[in-house]
Amino acid sequence: MLTVESIRKRFAGAEDAPAALDGVSFHVAPGDFFTLLGPSGCGKTTTLQCIAGLEAPDSGRITMGGDVVFCSERRIAVPANRRNLGMVFQSYAIWPHMTVHENVAFPLVHGMRKAASGEVGPRVRRALERVKLDALADRPAPLLSGGQQQRVALARALVHEPRLLLLDEPLSNLDAKLRDQMRVELRQLVKSLGITTVFVTHDQTEAMAMSDRVALMRQGRVVQLGSPRDLFLKPASAFAADFMGRTNMIRGRLVQAGPPAAIATPLGLIGSDGAPGLPAGAEVFAVVRPQAVTVLPDDAPADGLANVFRGRVIAQVFLGDVVEADLAVGEGSLRVLLSPYREAPVGAALTVEIPPAHCVVVPAEER
Amino acid sequence: MTRAGTLSRRLTQQNVALALLLLLVGVLVLGPLLVLVRTSFAPAGTAPLETTVVTLDNYRAMLASPDTLVLLRNTLVYAVGSVTIAVALATAVAWLTERTDMPGQVLVRILMFSWMAVPPLVLGFGWILLINPGQGLLNVWARAWFGATDAPFTLYSMWTLIVITALAAVPTAFVMVSGLLRNIDPQLEQAGKVLGGSAWSVVRRITLPLLTPGILSVVIYMFMAVVQTFDLPLIIGLTARIPVLSTRVYLLSSPDRGIPNYGLSSTFGIFLLLLASLLMWGYLHATRVGERFRVVTGKGFRPRRLVLGPWRWPALGGVMLYFLVMLMPLLMLFWASLFPVYRTPSLDLLAGASFASYAKAIGSSMVQRAALNTVLLVVLSGTIVMALAALVGWFSVRGGRRIGRIVDILSFAPTAIPPVVMVVAILLLYLRTPLYGTIAILVIGHVSIYLAFGARTMVAAIMQIHKELGDAALTSGASWLTSMRRITLPLVWPHMLNGWLWVVAHSARDLTIPLTLMTASNMVIASALWMMWDFPDLPGAAALSMLLVLGSLLLVVPLQIVAGRATAAPG
Ligand SMILES: Nc1ncnc2c1ncn2[C@@H]1O[C@H](COP(=O)(O)OP(=O)(O)OP(=O)(O)O)[C@@H](O)[C@H]1O
Ligand SMILES: [Mg+2]
């Protein structure tokens, strides 16, 4: 449905800064919920604006459902209003001089694909019903709460049935509770309409909860592309491992390239199933999610067993649903998750196992 | 799709609008300038644009003439004197209004804003009636009450010209300085107080240094404005034999006797333009320095006011005294408009007062035509300026860096071109076209001169509009024009109205353009006023002055009261 091919963009006036987009490519299948994820300033908004036609890339190609909407070689640049899109902006961009109804009706009245005048009313009403705002149709836009504005923006982006929906951090201005609720509602809504969606966020939890596929971006590049599960469980770089959630990054040296691989770390020798494609001797991180670490019974044998370590609790945080505990193991430390029902005071000894299947090895140079 | 895409890349509404804008502003601004430069190199006695000869004669004549030094000295003395007085007075009043608990602050603000609508020309006439050597009311009273033998107030001197100009310039300076004072972060002053400074040392050590870059930019701006003023030096300075650069440019191109010397006029014009450009450069520099020191917070702003205590009322009295002095010339004109022949005001004469001059003025076909022309002129000028300014604002803020810069420079350049120079250039450019002698040429003049102000207003306004509001219209499928018409313009509407009002008021009071381009068919109230005064028809001119002031105030005051209420600072 949407193909973005190596788009580059450097802003005028920022010539000495690194390019805002440095060869971004990805493909979004019809009906997919696709997410651009990355830290602030990595180029998510710029990518979205290039897709929307609000910014022109310096080079590259963008295709939508068979139509080339941008191609630097053939000098094609279809303007934003002819791309048949719906977009929700980070600021929501609700027009303050109009009512809710007028805001939502705008694409039908002034857009490229105008609706017959008799149809506008019913279609706006249906769009507002979808976001549960039909009761507020006549309210002036400035009198809406943040959550309501977000819904109006969504209704306005969907009312003309665009072929592609673009969402720029639509949830970031909402409070935590509302955000959790809207996450589910938003995904259900676009999925029920079957509309292809490109979603931008810097929150990895949001990305994982909502997306079919995620493109992880950094400094104007896509560094990893895959399902949320892939990104979380099989990060390809230290950056991806770190960005996708809490993790142990255990620095060490690859002593056996594998597979199976073996890494010499301050904790001791750690074995991994992962084949990182790195030569023996390379500096690496062993990526071990706290959730991956198994806590063995106190009387389990430890000495001499591969990937089994004995440690001492040096700190713990009681979070309610879990207890986060830091263990001193060998010369290093390891974070694990414990059941809140398990008593493990500071100083207690624990035996833990790192399953080789759940230990990912990534090169150490960048983070 | 492909074809449409390629084509639409070049021929979008946006690009068409940009091209039209650049063309229009380019012609308005650059056309006259080029003609001016060309004419300054043309030999004397030739009609402009009808010769191919290039000569430096005019420059030689200008440099060789001993007059030139006198002109320059007069201009500088005049400008330095009136700017110093005006800014000092304005700063005092602004400080009292913005930073102390003096009563009547809203009133002072509204009076100051409204006073900008009173034409300096009219004030000048009033002052002439007040202090001319023979009949001047103040002189008559001084002789009658204090036994003065000759006239203690001298009208026709450099000092009088300076004081009258300064008084007339105070409102503009007040508006600028009070803006500065409002934007100082009070926390900085409070920090000074917490550290143990007395109220006065805080003013001296913290407030004033913070203000210095801002005040400097106001001084340079006012300096530029005074160097460019034309009406007061014309009506007072000429009789007093105090020629300045602006009146010289005018007299060379529109002499009372003999044929115009456009070449020399243009050369002096270029000289004046260089002087103004230098000031302009200084102004931009000062405002840039000002930005660097800028301590604007905008939010949660609650100015701490100095408590004047028993001095509150004397302070207000002082400020009101200024307004009284400003009112005197208007009252004088009002008196003069009530009698067919001027007589020294006294209560006994009141019985013979009548509004006959008003009836005569309103009945005169010349005045009627001039009134119609004035309405046409001000409405067209205001509307065209604000329409262009809206586009300038949009492209300057949203058009990208290069385009923004070009549009900015083009629309700001006229600030450095003194109106009296611009009008000579326009005269030269359009003299042989059918436009000459019509209202259209006056509109062209005012649009060129006031575009810079309109553009500043709209750039600031559009900067406040979040970019995504316009973008949202585009992604909704609306064209660029629809997005402008339905979203951007409705959101900046109040700023546009304010700018429109400013242009209308200034266009109505300006004499430079209508007088230099005057023919029998394009007379407006300001030029008619000058004609009647010169004729002389004192009661007629006085009545017409009052009508002009009344008309301007009726338009400006109600809107200022509304705006004044909305922006009145808390506390
Ligand atoms: N108009 C502009 N002019 C110059 N540089 C820009 C402009 N817009 C964005 N940039 C730069 O381009 C880079 C990418 O910006 P972008 O807005 O795409 O980031 P983002 O990933 O959306 O960040 P955030 O999560 O903070 O919204 C940043 O370094 C930013 O400073
Ligand atoms: Mg962003």
Image (tube, coloured by chain):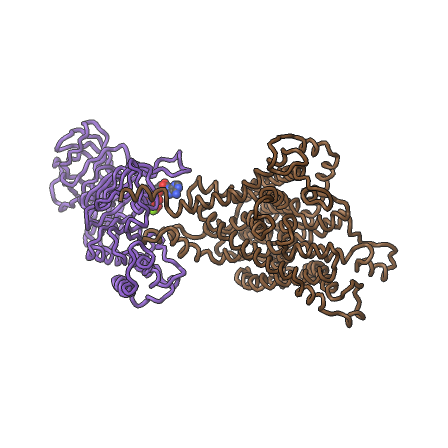
Chain colours: A purple, B brown
Q: Nearer the viewer, residue B176 or B396?
A: B396
For the image, the number of numbered tags is: 0
Can residue A326 be seen here? The reply is no
Relative side of A65 to B386, left or right: left
Relative side of B297 to B63, left or right: left
Image quadrant in which you'd find residue B108: bottom right
Residue B15 percent location from the top left of the image: 40, 44
The image quadrant where one finds the C terminus of chain B is bottom right
Can residue A250 be seen here? The reply is yes
Q: Nearer the viewer, residue A158 or A350?
A: A158
Above or below for B537 versus A58: below
Relative side of A357 to A20, left or right: left
Above or below for B242 versus A145: above
Q: Nearer the viewer, residue B217 or B264?
A: B264
Q: Residue at x 83, y 56 (%)?
A: B134
Residue closest to the far bottom: B351
